[in-house]
Amino acid sequence: MGIFTRFKDIVSANINAMLDKAEDPEKMIKLMIQEMEDTLVEIKASCAATMATKSKVARALDDVQYRVDDWGNKARLAVTKGREDLAREALAEKRVFSEESERLQKEIDQLEAIVTKYQGDITQLEEKLTNARKKHQILLQRHTQAQKSYKAQSVLRKNDNVDAFARFDAFENRIERMEADAELVNAKARPSIEDEFAKLEGDETLENELAALKAEIENKSSE
């Protein structure tokens, strides 16, 4: 692709529309900026080369114009000395250099037009590049903000989950405590085996004391 074709495509490009359609806008705008910078370098180089050529032609024009003036002066000198033959030859030489001067002047005018066109292209491209860089900066800021927002939301969701698990664990612990309390109450309500045996032993002692008391009374009555 030639430099002018690339320049035309870049200047006519709708950056916003291209970014809207791009899957990766940041990558797209980086490529666009790189293309603009490369094209700008080429245009500036071409403009500089054209200006150098113009300067070279201008120096040649100065030299030719000097010859035109010199042959004109020689023609006048020949006339004053009565040498019309030399005057004619001097005027012929002057005509040759005058034609060359006109040709060189046209070339300079053309080069000047090209330089002006280059300078206009450079201005347009620099404006486009400035706009693209601003878009890139905005995209970077939006990307950074999106990353921070995503991180914040992730932390919030994580905290929500932690709170939910904490509430679930607390509820489970509460149920376990209630179950333990219920078992404790039941344990207190039911006599243990040791209590049953102690009661039996107590009853047997009481019966033995009662039997002994009866025997004592009977013995006293029989006397």
Image: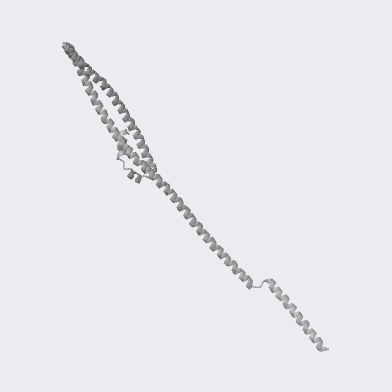
Which quarter of the figure is the N terminus placed in?
top left
The residue positioned 81% from the left and 87% from the top of the image is 220
Exactly how many numbered labels are in the figure? 0
Colouring rule applied to residues: one colour
Residue 206: percent from left, percent from top: 74, 79
Compare residues 26 and 176 and report the one nearer the observer. 26
The residue positioned 33% from the left and 43% from the top of the image is 15
Compare residues 133 and 30 and report the one nearer the observer. 133
Query: Is 73 rendered above or below residue 137?
Result: above
Query: Is 207 rendered above or below residue 192?
Result: below
Residue 128: percent from left, percent from top: 32, 39
Q: Quadrant of residue 19?
A: top left
Q: Is residue 112 visible?
A: yes
Q: Is residue 2 visible?
A: no
Is 167 displayed left or right of 85 in the figure?
Answer: right
Is 219 displayed left or right of 42 in the figure?
Answer: right
Compare residues 198 and 92 and report the one nearer the observer. 92
Is 176 displayed left or right of 210 in the figure?
Answer: left
Query: Is 107 rendered above or below residue 30?
Result: above
The residue positioned 69% from the left and 73% from the top of the image is 195
Work out which residue is located at the far front of the displayed protein and give it: 80
Residue 94: percent from left, percent from top: 20, 17
Which quarter of the figure is the C terminus placed in?
bottom right
Query: Is 87 rendered above or below residue 41?
Result: above
The residue positioned 58% from the left and 67% from the top of the image is 179
Residue 217: percent from left, percent from top: 79, 86
